Amino acid sequence: MQREAGSSVGRYVISSVIGRGGLSTVYSAHDTLLDRDVAIKVFSSHATSKELVRLQEAEARLAGKLNHHALTTLYDAGVETSDPERPQIYLVMEHVVGADLKSRLRRSTLNPLQLAYLGTDLNSALAYMHENGFVHCDIKPANVLISSRDEATRLRGKLTDFGIASIIGAHGGKGTTTGTAAYLAPEQVDGGDPTVATDTYALGLVLIEAFTGKLEFPGTMEETAVARLHRDPRVPAELPPDVAGILRDMVERDPTKRISARVAAERFERAAARLIAVEKGGVDIFAEPAVEETKDEKSRVDAVHRYGVLDTPPDEAFDRITRLAGRVLDSPISFVSIVDSDRVFHKSRLGADIEQVSREDSLCPITIEMGTPWYVSDIEIDERTRDNELLAANGVRAYAAAPMITTDGHSIGALCVYDTRPRTFSSDDLNYLEELAAIAMHELELRLAARRLAFERR
């Protein structure tokens, strides 16, 4: 039974209906004690059986355990007993001013930067849920809230509605097909249980829809379910390559090849940073290299050669830096690498005795192009690295690096570390690499200055 405006649930006064689902109705309301607006989820089913009570309480416990900026926050829970014979459990949550994504898309689709922001927020929230042992199981536009706060400058999204997730927590998910048909993963259509990978797939479909405004797999329940068994989702060609690559990796038909929500969040965050740089600087980072960039590469290679380091033997000063990098970041392999026009020279190496490789086989050229510290959590699945046969042959799975930048702004090489297991690197890890790379660069600058001084004295 729908509750009228002005009626009360506990100390909360109902304002209006926000949304309805098969199991509950969500209202906007006002907390008369704390004088704040809230959202109240009132379960449609009366708690007349122990099973219903157990499941509804499970959702309350789940929501209460999770605390993340991109998940709706649970404030309170209670039982409404105006009818003592038919009590109803309700949840009191933060009220997000804005609309759900389904409603938002009726107005307009998202541009690439907004999509990258939303992908960052929702994948970060999903990763947090997964790392705490929960699977959402019902990711769809109606369960994504878009805050109207600062929407013009930084779109913010939140995941909501953990009802099905609480049931999975209670039952284990065996023998069930949960979620909305249009967003099921292929393995669920085949009868598989919900997993973290099925969440990632569903979110990938939601993000594609946020850009196109269209369901990727429309039709009846049978049509939408079967379609994904026969084709991959279509990732729009109009998207920037890095954003499109993330989405493709989220909606891989093979769940073992999908990236994790954590990796997707990190990659979306980097994509957003690059898109912001494009907006501010007016530089199209997705365009083909211009003539000026070719000239910049020539200047960069000239800078490499002026240090006279390519043909020198291994150096103890650099060896200390690679040892320190390996120790601080707990990585078995580390290099000080100098990037020439066609080769990458490892001037110091720990854990792998490889003197040089072609540019195509190294990740250092990516580092010098980016000009900032970065990392790859899993080389085998990241689109930038998964086709690298040399890395695969040597059993490396993770990579982090910081560029070596000259005083006149040229990236001539990198301090990099590799690991033999997939892993993430923290911001502190990248800061350490950046500082150590700066020390290596300072050593080269000192040597160059000493050579010039000696030459001038002759």
Image (cartoon, grey):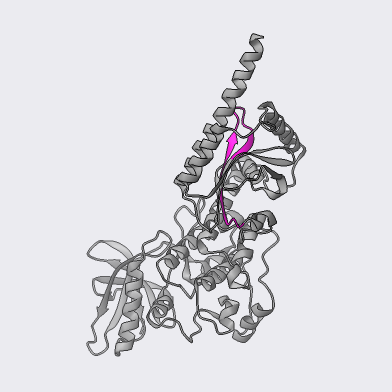
Main SS of the magenta part reads strand
Examine the rendered structure and indicate whether residue 215 appears above or below residue 262: below
Q: Quick one: 204 or 371, which is closer to the camera?
A: 371
**Residue 184 at x, y = what percent?**
56, 77
The image shows residue 153, relative to residue 220, as above or below, that is above
Q: Quadrant of residue 21?
A: bottom left
Q: Which residues are magenta?
A: 395-414
Q: Is residue 427 above or below residue 49?
A: above
Pick the quarter of the image with the N terminus: bottom left
- Can residue 39 be seen by looking at this rendering? no
Along the viewing direction, whichever of 223 and 414 lies nearer the viewer: 414
Q: Position of residue 260 (x, y in %)?
A: 53, 64
The residue lying furthest to the right in this view is: 291
Rendered-image quadrant of the C terminus: top right
Q: Residue furthest top?
A: 458
Magenta highlight on residue 401: yes
The quadrant holding residue 249 is bottom right
Mark yes or no: residue 418 visible: yes
Please count the marks in the image: 0
**Taking 341 as reference, is 251 left or right?**
left
Residue at horizontal 55 percent and vertical 71 percent from the top:
202
Residue closest to the eye, 360 or 233: 360
| Residue at 40% across, 67% down | 132
Rendering coords of residue 145 (x, y %):
46, 65
Residue at x-position 72% and y-position 48%: 360
Residue 420 among those drawn in magenta: no
On the image, the x and y values in percent for residue 199 come to 51, 71
